[in-house]
Amino acid sequence: MRLFITILMLLTFEAFAQEHMLKESQYKYVEQSIGKGKPYFLEVGSDSCHSCQVMGGMLYTITQKHPEYNIHFINVKKEREAAYELNVRMIPTQIIFDKNGQEVYRHIGALSSDELNNLFKTYLF
């Protein structure tokens, strides 16, 4: 019975998590907007990576509170050229571009919620 409840909870959590994930953006469209007066946050990862899913959930929550933030998820499984252009070697990778299009921050791995909030304050989102 415990196993059944555990499996049911995991499946429920998985379905909930997928509904509350940051949606994918096509890099070619995001790239055209970078450097046009607003900072951009790119989460580069894949939909099958656990740490990427955790980051996607946290970033989804932030976009719900701050829809004006430019936060985008680039899926490297579908956009290998974007990963190459962005020099992404491991996932998840977070990249912040300032309002002039200059890369000002890069991190590999998952971040905590507090670290994310501090980044958005630091880089004036």
Image (cartoon, rainbow, N blue to C red):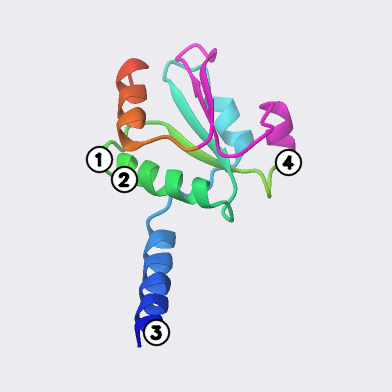
Three-letter code for the amino acid on which mark 1 is drawn: Lys
What number is the disc on residue 4?
3
Residue nearer the viewer, 42 or 30: 42
Q: Which comes sooner in the sequence, label 3 or label 2?
A: 3
The residue wearing badge 1 is 65
Separation of disc 3 and disc 2 at Cα? 30 Å
Quickly name the residue at label 4. 80
Q: Amino acid at mark 4?
A: Arg
Query: Is 121 situated above or below 68?
Result: above
Q: Residue at x 46, y 25 (%)?
A: 40
Kind of residue indicated by mark 3: Phe
Q: What segment is highlighted magenta in the picture? A: 81-109
The disc, 4 or 1, on the residue closer to the chain's N-terminal end is 1
* Quarter of the figure with residue 1: bottom left
Contact? badges 2 and 1 (CB < 8 Å): yes
Residues at marks 2 and 1, CA–CA distance in whole angstroms: 7 Å
**How many residues crowd mark 4 within 10 Å: few (<14), some (14–19), many (20+)?**
few
- The residue lying at 38 percent from left, 79 percent from top is 8
Q: Disc 2 or 4, which lies upstream in sequence?
A: 2
